[in-house]
Image: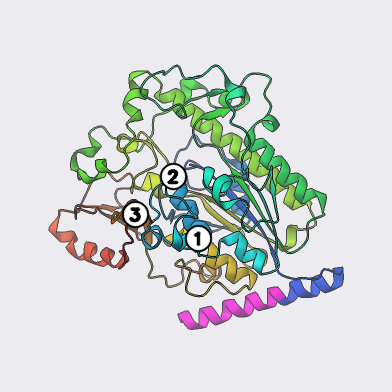
């Protein structure tokens, strides 16, 4: 059996041979830079209801499944924060929320001195000679328009101050389509678009079309970093009728992970976090199954758009020298733990889709169950592209050792932060949650994948809890900075 040091040396040797091979190819074809390109695909609010993660057997995601078959899927990957803003800020800076103090969506990126003074991921590639372009939701909402303003991007579609297109109310009026007029946010809506609306008419469709045409055009300066952010299946869950037709309402099943009275052994501290009690309203309105149908439909639409983007890359001249990383910013609960939202430290809210295809490095069809985090994107891309990361900034881990050997020694856990001093820690087997008031949860995923049985108060698990606590950061930056 190889030691960790020997494994690392072997991986570096293989990587060097790949780089040399690409350099030789670049010389032969007249290309000036052998560094690999990067296709960076973001998905919003997509939980483990995909074919690769098998969170719901009714989900249909053939294009993402196909992409996964070409590289490595991390089956135990988690977000840095279960909310769009802090999750994306962590990904783009490589800095965890407990270090930056960026805990909730309203915290601004550029007004936070720690994040503002960091080298953001697009800036990092731009500084290393990459042409950087993008479209859609990569950063969080208004942060892009009012603060980021295209920071680090050479080009952005539709513009450097507008990452997304005008809101789609015009395609789905009158609202709400779900008929629930009270007790829900104006964003919490779902239903099919008008019959004459095509996939290309939608905001996500415009982003995918731009990405596909940019790749097929063959005019990109290399090396390049191309980001494409797909907004669905974030609420409101609108999609063309054809996607609803794929999931007949009379065949929709309620989530397997839902359990009546599941909250009886959960600390009260969990309810002090942002708790959106939409499930009660949805159930009272008889809309639980239609809402699930809409989520599945929106996910299927997203999958087709991923297929459009990746398919274009495969047909392009860039296919053999482009790294693909696909990720979802956090998960989503569709009734589990009595929630219809992200915003928690449970598995349904933290588990993410995380797929890597790195030509000559990742093995087709490989999977890895080691606990990893979206914070690992930045250092891994730096490693794969041979670019020196910003000194002292990145808090994630380089995943390349797991590309070479999914069973390599890995003593790390995955940390999710939700609010000041609230932490969720995931190992290969356990999830440990500790709240600011000291209350705890512990779940054994080998026996309890739906997290129905809180073991934290059982004395026989004291040693496990003590071991999991080692994943809690030493520094807790106050919120609002």
Q: Does 16 appear in magenta?
A: yes
Q: Residue 442 at x, y = what percent?
A: 25, 53
Q: In this view, does 31 lie to the left or right of 310?
A: right
Tell me if residue 1 can be seen: no
Q: Judge whether 18 appears above or below 98 on screen.
A: below
Q: Residue 144 at x, y = what percent?
A: 57, 48
Tag 3 secondary structure: loop
Instruction: Examine the image and state in which quarter residue 136 appears.
Output: top right
Residue at coordinates 37% horizontally, 19% vertically from top-left?
A: 182
Q: In this view, does 366 lie to the left or right of 279?
A: right
Q: Is residue 87 or residue 126 the one in the foreground?
A: 126
Q: Is residue 249 or residue 376 the one in the foreground?
A: 376
Q: Which mark is residue 479?
A: 3
> Alpha-carbon distance for marks 2 and 3?
23 Å
Neighbour class for label 2 at 10 Å: few (<14), some, many (≥20)? many
Snapshot colouring: rainbow
């Amino acid at each position: 059996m190889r030691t960790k040091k020997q494994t690392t040396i072997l991986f570096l040797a293989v990587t060097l041979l790949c780089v040399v091979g690409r350099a030789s190819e670049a010389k032969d074809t007249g290309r000036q830079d052998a560094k690999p390109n990067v296709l960076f695909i973001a998905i919003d609010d997509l939980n483990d209801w995909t074919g690769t993660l098998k969170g719901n057997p009714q989900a249909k995601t053939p294009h993402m499944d196909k992409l996964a078959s070409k590289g490595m899927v991390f089956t135990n990957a988690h977000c840095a924060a279960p909310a769009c803003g802090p999750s994306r800020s962590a990904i783009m800076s490589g800095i965890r929320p407990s270090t930056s103090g960026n805990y909730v969506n309203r915290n601004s990126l550029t007004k936070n001195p720690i994040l503002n003074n960091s080298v953001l991921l697009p800036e990092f590639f731009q500084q290393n000679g990459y042409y950087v372009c993008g479209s859609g939701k990569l950063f969080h909402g208004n942060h892009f328009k009012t603060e980021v303003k295209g920071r680090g991007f050479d080009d952005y579609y539709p513009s450097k101050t507008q990452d997304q297109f005008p809101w789609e109310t015009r395609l789905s009026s009158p609202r709400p389509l779900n008929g629930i007029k009270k007790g829900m946010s104006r964003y919490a809506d779902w239903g099919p678009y008008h019959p004459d609306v095509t996939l290309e008419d939608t905001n996500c469709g415009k982003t995918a079309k731009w990405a596909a045409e940019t790749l097929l055009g063959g005019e990109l300066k290399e090396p390049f970093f191309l980001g494409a952010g797909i907004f669905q299946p974030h609420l409101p869950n609108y999609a063309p009728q054809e996607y609803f037709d794929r999931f007949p309402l009379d065949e929709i099943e309620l989530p397997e992970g839902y359990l009546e009275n599941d909250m009886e052994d959960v600390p009260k501290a969990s309810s002090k976090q942002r708790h959106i009690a939409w499930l009660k309203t949805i159930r009272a309105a008889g809309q639980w199954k239609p809402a699930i149908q809409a989520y599945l439909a929106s996910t299927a639409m997203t999958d087709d758009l991923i297929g459009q983007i990746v398919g274009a890359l495969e047909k392009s001249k860039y296919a053999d020298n482009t790294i693909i990383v696909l990720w979802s910013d956090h998960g989503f609960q569709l009734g589990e733990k009595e929630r219809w939202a992200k915003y928690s430290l449970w598995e349904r809210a933290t588990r993410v889709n995380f797929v890597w295809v790195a030509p000559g490095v990742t093995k087709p069809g490989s999977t890895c169950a080691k606990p990893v985090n979206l914070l690992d994107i930045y250092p891994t891309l730096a490693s794969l592209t041979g670019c020196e990361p910003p000194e002292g900034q990145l808090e994630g881990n380089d995943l390349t050792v797991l590309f070479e050997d999914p069973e390599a020694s890995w003593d790390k856990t995955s940390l999710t932060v939700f609010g000041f001093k609230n932490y969720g820690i995931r190992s290969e087997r356990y999830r440990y949650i500790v709240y600011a008031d000291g209350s705890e949860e512990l779940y054994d995923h080998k026996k309890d994948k739906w997290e129905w049985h809180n073991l934290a108060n059982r004395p026989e698990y004291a040693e496990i809890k003590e071991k999991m606590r080692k994943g809690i950061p030493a520094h807790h930056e106050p919120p609002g900075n």
